[in-house]
């Protein structure tokens, strides 16, 4: 292979990924005067950001004037079980309102308040109505606004192009080896900086709310380039995703169903949540069906139904029922609201759930129960970055959005993801511009490294025979679903690492049939490498953290442990190519931030906490 | 489980043909599921474009039994139990491979539309507008860019007038800007002279295939046509404008009539793949 014959494109900075974070980063890079390119696995405007519904959290105070960045920051830290990188949560809370207003300047049309301002809605964990939104399609509005603005900013969009490997010069970013999905041809990007905005890795699991693109590419690319990964044990499972039919397995069923009276039953018809009330919640939870029904009817003194316990508890209960053989026909639990509320109420309060089940599952939720089970939803962990610049430990390599780590700690609040994208997308663009300004000489791409990257990528096509990539992907999902699920224990995690090691050997001989032009089998084969790194990193981190915190649940180490609070799990690639996990102590937070996060809310709102800022 | 017969078009720009597949189909499957099954079991290299599998991204547009449909939203039990299902790529766009078409023409049209030009914000830095005023604009912004309206539009599909008509998707994009209370630009001359608003003869095929249920023709295209008529052909309005001394632009930006040249639309630029 002659590297000189490979198509070469030069940019000052290359953004990998065209979701909300990638587009916002690109717009900032261009505004900073950089020649900017964006590659995306899909067409422009199709990234997973379009799936976001609820809104973007920003303390604008349009609905409740009492809201401000400090309350938002405090909510975020508490939701993240204080595992968040303090500075990131601070930057996010302070800058989100300006980023939302900026979207409006670029054409976003948000829902309005009665006085004509951007409307904001309530959401779990947020003290005030804080989510700027457009009905239940806020993600689409975000991506389309950035897209339609971005195409006029002199940015070069390279659609259906997948990154393979970062090329380095003296430890610094010099380029990216990539391929066009439509033609199957290789392309070499020569660039001074790279911003990864590749999202999470939910496709390692079968039941996920994530699209096919979520194969952990950015994590793997960064890891292979020598960057550090962090917090990967914190994978958010939502307890109620659809489990049937196959086409919609994993799609979210809102917690609102339970909030409005929905109950969980097993195949015997038992309302099983009463058997799973943890000791510490017992005093606040109903212990008979009668009392739970009274709560719904508004009877004073009645305690909350057990279905409204925290997500980890509910997900663990559903999993236990399944393991005991009491699951629904398609492997879930029954979520029943039909027997609890009349049809008009359900259609009025849960219109999108009604529509979703009617259209896709042919289930009329006003007549029949839904089947639900835990679904992998979001990666709080990812690539470790410096908070203000979003630079990784590799000079010239940046990361933002879901593929970066730290902002959400052990658990993300709904609505904090879309605002994360636009806040840190912009900061990574500024960070890249600053880095490039300080760069002495332009890094040069090494021919041999480039050749190796492309040769490795063609191997699945050139092999005479080997494993079917679709079957290997299935095997990976079997392992992760069975042993690295919502409820974890040492035995399963250790066994998962063994299984992953043997699967890794099979992936080395994966075979894709056909030619390289728009060949999904080949694409699947290549993304297996990314998913294997992602899966191993999650499993290693999950095994290491011997406590249950936020989205990470260990049955053998229940509850939060004080001795784990000051630590992070970090993952790097060892000198021999083996994955290395290090338990790293976190730096102490600034006093002001600590005071706010741990403050009594009344004191905070009375202005008694910290200096004003 | 039932064994179903699928005919899937396989080929590329140089030509191709339907290939037969017999697939075990289980309850609840949609057409995209069956295509994935074909991919995993029979044809690993079958090219399909898809993303969200929930009708929200508009990637898996294809023609199923002759109609533009989203593969992810077309349930198998919506067909007769013994019927053969025929799947082929969208006809109005060049084939890349199998069911994947080159839709870059659409992205080029989008780029021709001048960007949103907001009014200055109010003194407190906010824009104020009311929900009633944005409802219609939000209807157009539900568009997921599946491009099935473009595929079915006979001006593009049968008459091949891509150089004269921007298509229904982008008519409603312009409508969304024209009707946006914050947008300060005048887009009527471009509608007539560059985007070909007169080409549409209101057969409403686009509205019929829209998976988002957007009333493309009645709420978007017709009001835009009316604005063009008011500007160019309504003698009363033209006289009134002359009397009141209120000039309205009649020629596209960049032509001699207009003094201040803002951004010149850049036609036929293809973004993306090089």
Image: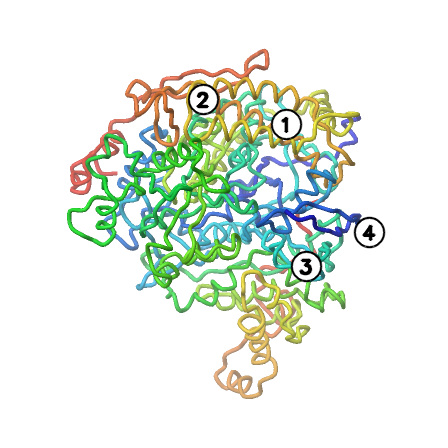
* Disc 2: host chain: A
Residue A78 picture location, percent across and down = 29, 34
Number of the label disc, if any, that sits on residue B120: none
Q: Are marks 2 and 1 on the same chain?
A: yes
**Quadrant position of residue A372:** top left
Q: How many marks?
A: 4
Where is B205 relative to A352, above or below?
A: below
Q: Tag on residue A165?
A: 1
**Residue that carries the numbered disc 3 in the rendered image:** B267
Circles 4 and 1 in contact, beta carbons < 8 Å: no
Could you tell me how far apart the alpha carbons at marks 4 and 1 are, in whole angstroms? 37 Å
Q: Determine whether A605 is above or below A2 in the image.
A: below
Q: Quadrant of the N terminus of chain A?
A: top right
The span from disc 3 to disc 1 (Cα, nearest Å) is 35 Å
Disc 2 or disc 3, which is closer to the eye?
A: 2
Q: Residues within 10 Å of mark 4 (few under 14, many from 20)?
A: few
């Amino acid at each position: 292979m002659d590297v000189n014959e490979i198509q070469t494109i030069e940019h000052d900075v290359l953004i990998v990924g065209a979701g909300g974070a990638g587009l916002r980063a690109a717009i900032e890079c261009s505004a900073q005067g950089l020649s900017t390119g964006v590659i995306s696995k899909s067409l422009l405007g199709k990234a997973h950001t379009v799936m976001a519904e609820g809104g973007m959290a920003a303390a604008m105070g349009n609905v409740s004037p009492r809201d401000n960045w400090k309350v938002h920051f405090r909510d975020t830290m508490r939701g993240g079980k204080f595992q968040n990188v303090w500075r990131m949560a601070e930057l996010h809370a302070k800058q989100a309102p300006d980023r939302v207003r900026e979207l409006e300047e670029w054409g976003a049309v948000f829902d309005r308040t009665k006085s004509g301002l951007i409307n904001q809605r309530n959401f779990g964990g947020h003290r005030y109505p804080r989510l700027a939104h457009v009905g239940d399609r806020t993600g689409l509005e975000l991506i389309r606004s950035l897209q339609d603005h971005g195409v006029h900013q002199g940015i070069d969009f390279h659609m259906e192009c997948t990154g393979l490997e970062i090329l380095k010069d003296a430890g610094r970013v010099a380029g990216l080896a990539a391929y066009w999905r439509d033609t199957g041809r290789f392309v070499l990007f020569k660039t001074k900086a790279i911003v990864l905005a590749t999202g999470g890795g939910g496709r390692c699991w079968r039941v996920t709310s994530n699209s096919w693109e979520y194969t952990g590419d950015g994590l793997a690319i960064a890891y292979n380039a020598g960057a550090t990964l962090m917090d990967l044990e914190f994978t958010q499972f939502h307890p109620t995703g659809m489990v049937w039919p196959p086409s919609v397995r994993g799609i979210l069923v809102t917690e609102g169903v339970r909030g409005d009276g929905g109950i969980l039953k097993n195949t015997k018809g038992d309302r099983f949540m009463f058997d799973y009330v943890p000791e510490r919640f017992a005093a606040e939870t109903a212990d008979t069906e009668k009392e739970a029904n009274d709560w719904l009817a508004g009877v004073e003194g009645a305690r909350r139904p057990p279905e409204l316990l925290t997500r980890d508890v509910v997900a663990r209960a559903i999993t236990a029922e399944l393991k005991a053989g009491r699951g629904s026909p398609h492997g879930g639990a029954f979520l029943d609201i039909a027997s609890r509320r009349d049809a008009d109420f359900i259609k009025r309060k849960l219109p999108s759930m009604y529509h979703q089940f009617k259209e896709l599952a042919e289930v009329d939720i006003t007549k029949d129960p839904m089947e639900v089970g835990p679904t992998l939803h979001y990666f709080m962990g990812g690539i470790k970055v410096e908070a203000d610049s979003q630079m990784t430990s590799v000079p010239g390599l940046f990361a933002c959005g879901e593929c970066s780590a730290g902002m959400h700690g052990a658990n993300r609040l709904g609505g904090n993801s879309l605002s994360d994208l636009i806040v840190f997308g912009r900061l990574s663009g500024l960070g890249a511009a600053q880095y490039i300004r300080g760069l002495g000489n332009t890094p040069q791409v090494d021919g041999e490294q480039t050749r190796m990257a492309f040769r490795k990528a063609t191997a699945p096509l050139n092999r005479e025979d080997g494993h079917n990539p679709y079957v290997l992907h299935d095997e990976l999902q079997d392992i992760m679903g069975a042993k690295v699920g919502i409820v974890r224990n040492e035995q399963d995690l250790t066994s998962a690492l063994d299984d992953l090691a043997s699967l890794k050997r099979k992936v080395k001989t994966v075979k894709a049939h056909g030619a390289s032009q728009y060949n999904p089998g080949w694409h699947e084969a290549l993304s297996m490498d990314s998913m294997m790194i992602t899966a191993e990193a999650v499993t290693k981190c999950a095994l290491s953290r011997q406590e249950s915190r936020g989205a990470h649940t260990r049955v053998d180490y229940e509850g939060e442990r004080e001795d784990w609070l000051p630590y992070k799990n970090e993952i790097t690639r060892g000198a021999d190519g083996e994955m290395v996990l290090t338990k790293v102590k976190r730096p102490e937070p600034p006093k002001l931030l600590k005071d706010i996060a741990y403050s009594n809310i009344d004191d905070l709102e009375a202005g008694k906490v910290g200096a004003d800022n | 489980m039932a064994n179903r017969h699928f005919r899937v078009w396989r080929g590329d720009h140089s030509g191709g043909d339907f290939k037969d597949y017999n697939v075990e189909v289980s309850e609840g499957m949609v057409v995209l599921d069956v295509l994935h099954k074909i991919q995993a079991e029979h044809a690993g290299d079958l090219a399909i474009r898809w993303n969200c599998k929930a009708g929200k991204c508009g990637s898996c547009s294809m023609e199923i039994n002759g109609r533009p449909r989203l593969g992810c939203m077309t349930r198998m039990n919506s067909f007769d139990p013994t019927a053969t299902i025929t799947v082929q790529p969208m006809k109005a766009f060049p084939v890349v491979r199998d069911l994947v078409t080159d839709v870059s023409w659409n992205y080029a049209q989008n780029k021709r539309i001048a960007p949103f030009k907001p009014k200055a914000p109010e003194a407190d830095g906010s824009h104020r507008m009311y929900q009633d005023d944005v409802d219609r604009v939000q209807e157009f912004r539900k568009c997921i860019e599946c491009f099935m309206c473009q595929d079915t539009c006979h001006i593009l599909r049968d008459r091949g007038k891509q150089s004269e008509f921007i298509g229904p998707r982008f008519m409603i994009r312009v409508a969304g800007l024209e009707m946006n209370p914050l947008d300060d630009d005048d887009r009527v001359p471009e509608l007539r002279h560059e985007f070909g608003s007169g080409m549409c003869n209101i057969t409403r095929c686009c509205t019929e295939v829209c998976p988002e249920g957007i009333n493309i023709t009645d709420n978007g295209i017709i009001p835009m046509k009316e604005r063009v008529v008011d500007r160019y052909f309504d003698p009363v309005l033209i006289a009134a404008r002359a009397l009141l001394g209120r000039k309205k632009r009649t020629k596209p930006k960049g032509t001699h009539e207009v003094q201040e040249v803002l951004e010149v639309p850049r036609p036929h630029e293809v973004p993306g793949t090089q």
